[in-house]
Image (tube, grey):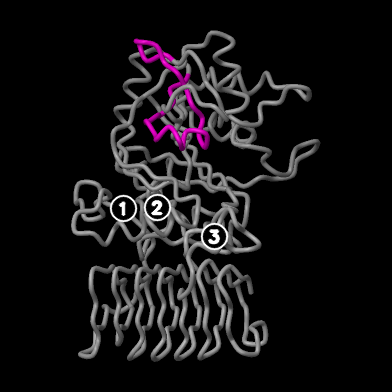
Amino acid sequence: MNVVAMILAGGQGTRLTVLSETRAKPAVPFAGKFRIIDFTLSNCVNSGIYTVGVLTQYRPHSLNEHIGIGKPWDLDRAKGGVRILQPYQGRGGQVWYAGTADAIYQNLDYIREQRADTVLVLSGDHIYKMDYRPMLRYHREKGAALTIGVMPVPLEEAHRFGIMEVDGEGRIVRFQEKPKEPRSNLASMGIYVFDRPALEHRLGEGTADSPRVDFGQHVVPAMLAAGDRVFAYRFQGYWVDVGTVHAYWATNLELVQPEPALDLYDENWPIYTKSQERPAVKVTPQARVLRSLVSNGSIVRGHVENSVLSPGVYVSPGAVVRDSVIMNDTWIGPGALVQRAVIDKEVTVGAGTLIGQGDPDIPNQQMPDRLNTGITVVGKGAEIPEGSRIGCNVLINSGRREEAFPEDRVVPDGQTI
């Protein structure tokens, strides 16, 4: 079996608000030193798959810089290796990928170049550890045209996923994309194993009136209607879609527990990443660090509790960081309090500033469906003036300076700067 992995990494991740404003969702930092896409890339190489195409589109610069030639993942190879696949303009061709299936369709030439007989289509924006080899064997044993990775989800969450019903053999008999009234809780993980000829055939039969744009909406239903052998592969491990601010925040903070469900210290399944050369963490005598992840290059002179700090974070004397995710090179000023917050890269939090104090039940007025669980989000490069009072569910956009804040420096719950 000659396998090529195609990682869909062009998503905007709009539910992450300003965290994905200047980068694609797969490039968002996670667990301190990693990026979200590191998990999918590491799953590939740990599964012995060394031919990988990464399909980018939205704000690809950060992702391109991070992946480079693939050296951290041992993907800098003359044969196979990693290839960044961006949309391009051709004669009569399409500029942008219109959907997941269209993105693969526009890169069928790359798949053919690799002489692959099996195509593994993956999402680059999920947090999980998975050995793809058992799924590939299952696909071959079933003689399937398509195998979909699935796992049960709470029934009340099923409307967010592609939901399927299977028979006793594991063959999918019914598929619904994000149904309002789901008949099952068996959800698609966005992991597809295709027999290459079947994939080419189904993508190639799309027309202007009936395009093959999306796998869940178009390709899978078409294959079921045609009687193709489509099977479900049940995954039993850890898998999370960190597509919302709350899911991102909560999944990060789960990692500080004594025995988290996601083990980042498993020597048999390492997560690789592009690391910066920075000195070791410095914790001064007046500092206190409890139940936290603190990355290389950080200096802690204050109090850090139940939090995740990315490389280069500075916590000043008297400052308190609690229940928060702080990204690279952010400076927390003396006497500041940061709680229940997600703070992006290169943010300055002025001395004496309070972030996250207020009523968590007041949602953000501009984004009530995205910031409503008490978490305050600060965008990349923002400068919060000293002595500011920032409430709950507040959104501070990237690059905001002192003049953007009210004269009294008070930002009530649910407001946006």
Q: Magenta stretch?
A: 146-171
Residue type beneath disc 2:
Asp
- Residue drawn at 20 percent across, 51 percent down: 266
Q: Residue 271 bears which disc, if any?
A: 1
Q: Depth check: 354 or 175 in front?
A: 354
Disc 2 or 3, which lies upstream in sequence? 2
Q: Is residue 166 left or right of residue 317?
A: right
Q: Depth check: 298 or 369 in front?
A: 369
Q: Depth check: 81 or 213 in front?
A: 213
- Residue drawn at 47 percent across, 12 percent down: 229
Residue type beneath disc 3:
Leu
Is 120 located above or below residue 75 in the figure? above
Name the residue beneath numbered marker 3: 371
Q: Residue 38 bears which disc, if any?
A: 2
Residue density around tag 1, few if under 14, some if 14–19, many if 20 or more, within 10 Å: many
Residue 61 image point, x, y percent = 58, 60
Q: CA distance from mark 2 to mark 1?
A: 7 Å
Local secondary structure at mark 1 = loop
